[in-house]
Image (tube, rainbow, N blue to C red):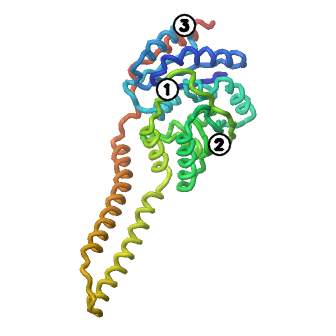
Amino acid sequence: MLISIVVPVFNEEENIAFFHAEVCRHMESMPYDFEILFVDDGSRDATPFILERLTGQDSRVRALILARNFGHQIALSCGLDHAEGDAVITMDGDMQHPPSMLPELIAAWEQGYQVVQTIRQSTEGASWFKNVTSSLFYKLINGMSKIHIYEGGSDFRLLDRQVVASFRRFRERARFIRGMISAIGYRQTHIEFTAPPRFAGTSKFSFQRMLHFALDGITSYSKTPLRIAFYIGILCGLASFALTLHVLYIKLLTEEAVPGWATISASILLLGGLQLAGLGVIGEYVGRIFEEVKQRPLYWLRADMGRQNRQADKDSVP
C-alpha cells in the first residue's frame, strides 16, 4: 500500500532538505511504500532547483511546479489531485507540522478512520495577536455556519483514498479546505499537538493573507453576512420611519420646529454608510459568483518533476 505525503511550499529553500530527511526517517520505519509530493506555489527563491535535485536523488519524491503563485489552498488541492496513495497526508514543509506524528496519523487510519485531523493546541513562539485573532475567527465561523470546525484545526491531516476521490469533485475557486473536510463526512477523528517553531525562514502567511483566508472561509460556508445586512436594513428603515413621524409631529402639532440640518445630515451619513456596507457584502458574494461562472482551471503547471523516475522504477520490476 502507498502513502502519499502532499507538501505545498513557497520560498522554503532553507527547509526542504531537512524536511525531506525527517519525513523519510519516520516513514521508512513504517510497513508502507510512500511518495512525497511537493507542490511549489510559484517560489521566487531556489526552491524549484532544490526540488529538481531531490527528484533526481530520490525516486519517491515528485515535484509539481505551479506556473505562478495560486495560494496555499489551491496548491494543496493540486497535490490532492495528483496523489496516488491509498491514504494521503497533507502537511506544511516548515516543520511546524511535525513529521514525527506521521506514524500516529497512519495508526488512526489503520483503526478505520477515514479522516484524521490534527488540532493545534498552541504554537511555540506565536504572538498573542495571532492566537487571539485565530480563536476569534473559529468562534465567528462556527457561530455563522452550519458546519463545525475544530478550533486550532490545521491543514495537517490524513485522508483515505475514498475521501480524496470525493474531495476532487469539489471545484470551487474560493477554497477553505478545513471547512470542506469538516463538511465532507466519513468517519473522522482528531489528534492534538503543539506546533513547534519554524525550522528556518519566516512565515509567508501575512496579516493580509490571513484576512483573505478568513473571508473565504466565512463567505464559502455562511450566508449570515447577507442576512445581517438585510436585518440592519430593516432596523434602519424602522428607525427612519419613526424619525419621520417625529418630524411630522413637531412640524404639524407644535410650534417648536427646530432647524433639522444636524439630524438630517446624521441620518444621511448613517443610512448612506449602512447602504454602502450592505452593497459591499453583496458585492463580495457577487464577485465570487463571477469567478465561479468563468469556469477557469484552478491551477496550471509549469513542470512535473519526478514522474519519469518513478515510472522507470515500476518498469524495472519483473
Disc marking residue 186: 2
Disc 1 target residue? 202
Mark 2 burial class by Cα count in 10 Å: few <14, some 14-19, many 20+: some
Left or right relative to 168: residue 279: left
For the residues bearing labels 1 and 3, Cβ distance under 8 angstroms: no
Quadrant of the frame with the N terminus:
top right
Q: Is residue 10 above or below residue 160?
A: above
Q: Depth check: 225 or 164 in front?
A: 225
Q: In x, y percent, where is residue 272?
A: 30, 64
Q: Which residue does the image show at 56% across and 25% down from the upper left?
A: 198
Q: Closer to us: mark 2 or mark 3?
A: 3
Q: Is residue 193 above or below residue 291?
A: above
Q: How many marks?
A: 3
Q: Depth check: 66 or 259 in front?
A: 259
Q: In x, y percent, where is residue 287?
A: 34, 48
Q: Visible in this render: residue 161?
A: no
Query: Element at badge 2?
Result: loop
Query: Element at badge 1?
Result: loop
Disc marking residue 149: none
Disc 3 target residue? 57
Q: Earlier in the sequence, mark 1 or mark 2?
A: 2
Q: Is residue 144 above or below residue 58?
A: below
Q: Earlier in the sequence, mark 1 or mark 3?
A: 3
Q: In x, y percent, where is residue 255?
A: 26, 92
Give the distance between the C-alpha atoms of the residues marked 2 and 3, in whole angstroms: 37 Å
Q: Earlier in the sequence, mark 2 or mark 3?
A: 3
Q: Visible in this render: residue 151?
A: yes
Quadrant of the frame with the C terminus:
top right
